[in-house]
Image (spheres, rainbow, N blue to C red):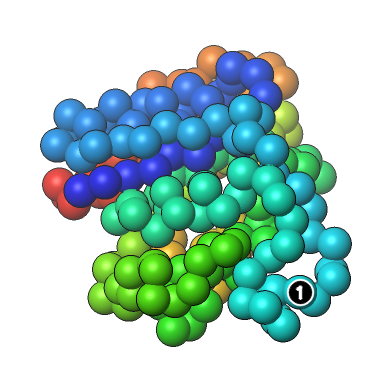
Protein backbone atom coordinates (compact mmCIF):
# COMPACT_ATOMS: atom_id res chain seq x y z
CA UNK A 1 0.00 0.00 0.00
CA UNK A 2 1.42 3.35 -1.11
CA UNK A 3 -0.08 6.60 0.23
CA UNK A 4 0.67 10.20 -0.71
CA UNK A 5 -0.02 12.80 2.00
CA UNK A 6 -0.47 16.38 0.75
CA UNK A 7 -0.23 19.03 3.48
CA UNK A 8 -1.40 22.37 2.04
CA UNK A 9 -0.77 24.40 5.20
CA UNK A 10 1.96 27.03 5.47
CA UNK A 11 2.61 26.80 9.22
CA UNK A 12 2.42 24.00 11.84
CA UNK A 13 -1.04 23.70 13.32
CA UNK A 14 -4.07 21.45 13.73
CA UNK A 15 -4.15 20.33 10.09
CA UNK A 16 -0.42 19.56 9.87
CA UNK A 17 -0.56 17.69 13.20
CA UNK A 18 -3.58 15.65 12.12
CA UNK A 19 -2.06 14.81 8.73
CA UNK A 20 1.14 13.65 10.43
CA UNK A 21 -0.89 11.58 12.92
CA UNK A 22 -2.75 9.86 10.06
CA UNK A 23 0.55 9.25 8.23
CA UNK A 24 2.17 7.64 11.28
CA UNK A 25 -0.86 5.39 11.79
CA UNK A 26 -0.79 4.34 8.13
CA UNK A 27 2.94 3.59 8.34
CA UNK A 28 2.40 1.56 11.52
CA UNK A 29 -0.19 -0.43 9.57
CA UNK A 30 2.41 -1.27 6.92
CA UNK A 31 1.83 1.45 4.31
CA UNK A 32 4.54 3.50 2.62
CA UNK A 33 3.78 7.22 2.91
CA UNK A 34 5.08 9.86 0.50
CA UNK A 35 4.81 13.23 2.31
CA UNK A 36 4.34 16.43 0.29
CA UNK A 37 4.18 20.02 1.54
CA UNK A 38 2.30 22.00 -1.07
CA UNK A 39 4.03 25.23 -0.02
CA UNK A 40 7.33 23.75 -1.25
CA UNK A 41 5.93 23.24 -4.77
CA UNK A 42 5.14 25.67 -7.56
CA UNK A 43 1.49 24.98 -8.41
CA UNK A 44 -0.22 27.75 -10.39
CA UNK A 45 -3.84 28.55 -11.16
CA UNK A 46 -5.51 27.55 -14.41
CA UNK A 47 -5.41 30.33 -17.03
CA UNK A 48 -8.46 28.96 -18.91
CA UNK A 49 -6.48 28.89 -22.18
CA UNK A 50 -8.12 25.63 -23.30
CA UNK A 51 -4.85 24.04 -24.44
CA UNK A 52 -5.49 20.93 -22.35
CA UNK A 53 -8.56 20.19 -24.48
CA UNK A 54 -6.63 20.68 -27.72
CA UNK A 55 -3.34 18.98 -26.87
CA UNK A 56 -4.31 16.61 -24.05
CA UNK A 57 -2.09 18.26 -21.44
CA UNK A 58 -1.68 21.56 -19.60
CA UNK A 59 0.78 24.09 -21.03
CA UNK A 60 1.69 25.56 -17.61
CA UNK A 61 5.25 24.65 -16.65
CA UNK A 62 5.20 24.05 -12.90
CA UNK A 63 5.38 21.21 -10.36
CA UNK A 64 1.84 19.91 -10.86
CA UNK A 65 2.71 17.23 -13.50
CA UNK A 66 5.22 15.69 -11.08
CA UNK A 67 2.68 15.77 -8.25
CA UNK A 68 0.02 14.23 -10.52
CA UNK A 69 2.42 11.41 -11.35
CA UNK A 70 3.06 10.78 -7.64
CA UNK A 71 -0.71 10.70 -7.03
CA UNK A 72 -1.14 8.26 -9.93
CA UNK A 73 1.42 5.92 -8.35
CA UNK A 74 -0.37 5.94 -4.98
CA UNK A 75 -3.18 3.72 -3.74
CA UNK A 76 -4.42 6.31 -1.25
CA UNK A 77 -4.33 10.06 -0.74
CA UNK A 78 -4.39 12.17 2.43
CA UNK A 79 -5.21 15.84 1.82
CA UNK A 80 -4.95 18.42 4.59
CA UNK A 81 -6.05 22.02 4.10
CA UNK A 82 -7.19 24.93 6.23
CA UNK A 83 -10.65 26.42 5.76
CA UNK A 84 -10.97 30.03 4.63
CA UNK A 85 -14.56 31.31 4.56
CA UNK A 86 -16.07 27.95 3.55
CA UNK A 87 -13.37 27.22 0.96
CA UNK A 88 -10.01 25.47 0.87
CA UNK A 89 -6.93 27.69 1.11
CA UNK A 90 -5.39 29.28 -2.01
CA UNK A 91 -2.69 26.63 -2.55
CA UNK A 92 -5.31 23.87 -2.46
CA UNK A 93 -7.56 25.92 -4.75
CA UNK A 94 -4.78 26.09 -7.35
CA UNK A 95 -4.37 22.31 -7.09
CA UNK A 96 -8.13 21.69 -7.37
CA UNK A 97 -8.31 24.07 -10.32
CA UNK A 98 -6.23 21.78 -12.55
CA UNK A 99 -5.69 18.33 -11.07
CA UNK A 100 -8.78 16.65 -12.59
CA UNK A 101 -7.50 17.34 -16.12
CA UNK A 102 -4.58 14.97 -15.44
CA UNK A 103 -6.94 12.04 -14.73
CA UNK A 104 -9.52 11.68 -17.52
CA UNK A 105 -12.25 9.03 -17.36
CA UNK A 106 -10.19 6.67 -19.52
CA UNK A 107 -7.73 6.11 -16.67
CA UNK A 108 -4.83 7.38 -18.80
CA UNK A 109 -2.64 9.86 -16.92
CA UNK A 110 -1.76 12.96 -18.99
CA UNK A 111 1.70 14.48 -18.66
CA UNK A 112 3.34 17.26 -20.72
CA UNK A 113 5.61 15.99 -23.48
CA UNK A 114 4.56 12.36 -23.08
CA UNK A 115 2.16 10.39 -25.22
CA UNK A 116 -0.30 7.69 -24.09
CA UNK A 117 2.13 4.90 -25.05
CA UNK A 118 4.77 6.27 -22.65
CA UNK A 119 2.47 6.33 -19.59
CA UNK A 120 0.96 3.19 -18.02
CA UNK A 121 -2.79 2.75 -18.46
CA UNK A 122 -4.27 1.46 -15.21
CA UNK A 123 -8.05 1.94 -14.86
CA UNK A 124 -8.28 -0.83 -12.24
CA UNK A 125 -5.73 0.75 -9.90
CA UNK A 126 -7.28 4.16 -10.51
CA UNK A 127 -10.74 2.91 -9.62
CA UNK A 128 -9.42 1.56 -6.31
CA UNK A 129 -7.71 4.80 -5.25
CA UNK A 130 -9.13 6.25 -2.03
CA UNK A 131 -8.69 9.45 -0.04
CA UNK A 132 -9.22 11.03 3.37
CA UNK A 133 -9.62 14.77 3.88
CA UNK A 134 -8.45 16.76 6.91
CA UNK A 135 -9.39 20.40 7.47
CA UNK A 136 -9.64 22.93 10.30
CA UNK A 137 -11.23 26.26 11.09
CA UNK A 138 -11.28 28.74 13.95
CA UNK A 139 -15.06 28.75 14.42
CA UNK A 140 -16.58 26.55 17.17
CA UNK A 141 -19.34 24.02 16.70
CA UNK A 142 -22.20 24.18 15.79
CA UNK A 143 -21.34 27.38 13.89
CA UNK A 144 -18.53 25.68 11.95
CA UNK A 145 -20.91 23.14 10.44
CA UNK A 146 -23.96 25.42 10.16
CA UNK A 147 -22.11 28.06 8.14
CA UNK A 148 -20.13 25.51 6.14
CA UNK A 149 -16.66 26.47 7.39
CA UNK A 150 -15.75 22.79 7.68
CA UNK A 151 -18.18 21.17 5.24
CA UNK A 152 -17.35 23.60 2.39
CA UNK A 153 -13.70 22.58 1.88
CA UNK A 154 -14.58 18.90 2.32
CA UNK A 155 -17.26 19.17 -0.38
CA UNK A 156 -14.84 20.93 -2.75
CA UNK A 157 -12.12 18.33 -2.26
CA UNK A 158 -14.53 15.39 -2.41
CA UNK A 159 -15.95 16.65 -5.72
CA UNK A 160 -12.59 17.25 -7.43
CA UNK A 161 -11.08 14.02 -6.15
CA UNK A 162 -14.18 12.18 -7.37
CA UNK A 163 -13.78 13.64 -10.85
CA UNK A 164 -10.18 12.43 -10.73
CA UNK A 165 -11.30 8.88 -9.96
CA UNK A 166 -10.37 9.08 -6.26
CA UNK A 167 -13.10 8.09 -3.79
CA UNK A 168 -13.19 9.90 -0.44
CA UNK A 169 -13.77 7.41 2.37
CA UNK A 170 -13.55 9.68 5.41
CA UNK A 171 -12.80 13.15 6.73
CA UNK A 172 -11.77 14.99 9.89
CA UNK A 173 -12.69 18.62 10.60
CA UNK A 174 -10.91 20.20 13.55
CA UNK A 175 -12.90 23.18 14.89
CA UNK A 176 -12.51 26.00 17.40
CA UNK A 177 -8.77 26.33 16.79
CA UNK A 178 -8.93 29.99 17.84
CA UNK A 179 -9.50 29.00 21.48
CA UNK A 180 -7.99 25.50 21.32
CA UNK A 181 -5.09 25.44 18.81
CA UNK A 182 -3.94 22.03 20.06
CA UNK A 183 -5.58 18.94 18.57
CA UNK A 184 -7.75 17.19 21.12
CA UNK A 185 -7.41 13.52 22.00
CA UNK A 186 -10.56 12.42 20.16
CA UNK A 187 -9.40 14.26 17.05
CA UNK A 188 -6.01 12.52 17.18
CA UNK A 189 -7.81 9.19 17.58
CA UNK A 190 -9.93 9.89 14.50
CA UNK A 191 -6.86 10.92 12.50
CA UNK A 192 -5.21 7.61 13.47
CA UNK A 193 -8.34 5.71 12.46
CA UNK A 194 -8.40 7.44 9.07
CA UNK A 195 -4.77 6.51 8.52
CA UNK A 196 -5.43 2.86 9.36
CA UNK A 197 -8.58 2.76 7.20
CA UNK A 198 -6.67 4.18 4.25
CA UNK A 199 -3.97 1.57 4.78
CA UNK A 200 -6.66 -1.12 4.65
CA UNK A 201 -6.25 -2.28 8.23
CA UNK A 202 -9.77 -1.52 9.47
- Vertical order, 160 against 67 (above or below): below
Residue 54, position in %: x, y?
A: 72, 82
Task: Classify mark 1: helix, strand or loop.
Answer: helix
86 relative to 2 in the view: left or right: right
Residue at horizontal 40%, vertical 58%? 72
Residue 179, position in %: x, y?
A: 68, 17
Q: Give the camera-side residue of 77 and 48.
A: 48
The residue at which mark 1 appears reads as 51
Give the quarter of the image for residue 99.
Answer: bottom right
142 relative to 47 in the view: left or right: left
Question: How many labels sit on residues?
Answer: 1
Give the quarter of the image for residue 181.
Answer: top right
Residue 75, position in %: x, y?
A: 30, 55
Residue at horizontal 59%, vertical 62%? 112
21 relative to 29 in the view: left or right: right
Residue at horizontal 66%, vertical 52%? 95
The answer to whether residue 149 of the structure is visible from this angle is: no
Q: Give the camera-side residue of 74 and 187.
A: 74
Q: Give the camera-side residue of 128 and 71.
A: 71
Give the quarter of the image for residue 91.
Answer: top right
Residue 52, position in %: x, y?
A: 70, 74
The answer to whether residue 197 of the structure is visible from this angle is: yes
Q: How would you rate the neighbour count of disc 1 (Cα within 10 Å): few for under 14, some for 14-19, many for 20 or more?
A: few
- Vertical order, 151 against 165 (above or below): above
Residue at horizontal 30%, vertical 73%? 122
Amino acid sequence: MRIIAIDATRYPGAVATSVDTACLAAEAAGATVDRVRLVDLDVRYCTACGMCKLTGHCKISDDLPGLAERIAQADGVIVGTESYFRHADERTQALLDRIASYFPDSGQLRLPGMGPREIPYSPVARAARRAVIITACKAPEPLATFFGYTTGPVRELRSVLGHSGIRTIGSLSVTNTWRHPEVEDWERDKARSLGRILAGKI
